Image (tube, rainbow, N blue to C red):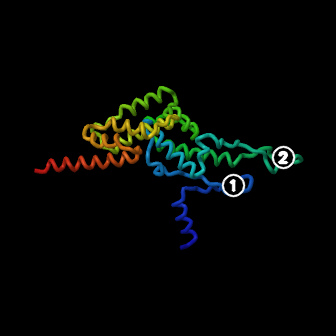
Amino acid sequence: MSTQATSATSSISSPSVILLGANNNNHIPQSLIAINSTQIPIKLSKGGNYAVWRSQFENLLFGYGLMGYPDGSKPCPPDVIPNPTRSSENHTVPETIANPDNHIWLRQDRLLLHTIQVTCTGAAQSIVTRSTTSVQAWEKLESSYANRSNTGKLGLLDSLTNVNLADKLVTKYMQGIKNILDNLELIGHSVDDGATVIHTLNGLGPAYLPLASAIRTRDTPISFEELYDKLLDHESFLKRDESKKGVP
């Protein structure tokens, strides 16, 4: 394969776009990283899944070394810098020149802002539409969905207390509980496995009473993940039993 073909293949598979500009200190080419929105499969909607969305976003940005943009720890460099070629004797040379790092930062930040915007839908998207920087969008979503007030905590705890399987599938029921737990964790209020299991069992219908009774009388505690598996198994059993009743 030719060098040109190899280069073309590499540019397709890589998430990086190499800039033609150079760092003003050591002239090492810098790169822009364009994140594909498919790398964040769970889109932020009305805020109920904010904790999950933020977790996958933070992990991805940390892996790329870009978390400093939205969290504000990597601020924008100044737009101009002292001219390194100017000497005290040569006053015809400008005192300052455009800072290439500023232009690179602005472009990278806009790429991250775009990723935030396209991974938000509905009400969440409208919150970040007018943002001009990734940190601005990040802070708007934080203030909108990561409610750290006592009212927010009480509301989430009330939701956890009143969870109900009803006619939902076990997968959807447990995902709803997990979303509540994630959002409680986000505002600094963790719920231990024991309390989570009790709330989960309380929301089950009569068809799950034998399983719930067996779990309550266990000598050893059960984790949320193990309970999830047992509920899925019991759901499958109920479906098989129902199908048998329909056979003449």
Give above or below for 129 relative to 56.
Answer: above
Tell me the CA gap for discs 2 and 1.
24 Å
> Along the horizontal axis of the image, is 215 left or right of 138?
left
| Residue at left offset 44%, top offset 35% | 123
Residue 201 shows up from this direction: yes
Q: Amino acid at mark 2?
A: Thr
In-front residue for pair 213/179: 213
> Along the horizontal axis of the image, is 222 left or right of 20?
left
| Residue at left offset 34%, top offset 45% | 171
In-front residue for pair 211/95: 211
- Residue 92 numbered tag: 2
The crowding category of the residue bearing disc 1, from other C-alpha atoms within 10 Å (few below 14, some 14 to 19, many at least 20), is some
| Residue 176 sits in quarter | top left
- SS at badge 2: loop
The residue lying furthest to the right in this view is 89
The residue lying furthest to the front in this view is 219
Q: Amino acid at mark 1?
A: Ala
Q: Which residue is mark 1?
A: 22
In-front residue for pair 143/38: 143
Residue 197: x percent and y percent?
39, 39
> Along the horizontal axis of the image, is 180 left or right of 210?
right
Residue 175: x percent and y percent?
38, 42
In-front residue for pair 80/55: 55
Residue 45 shows up from this direction: no
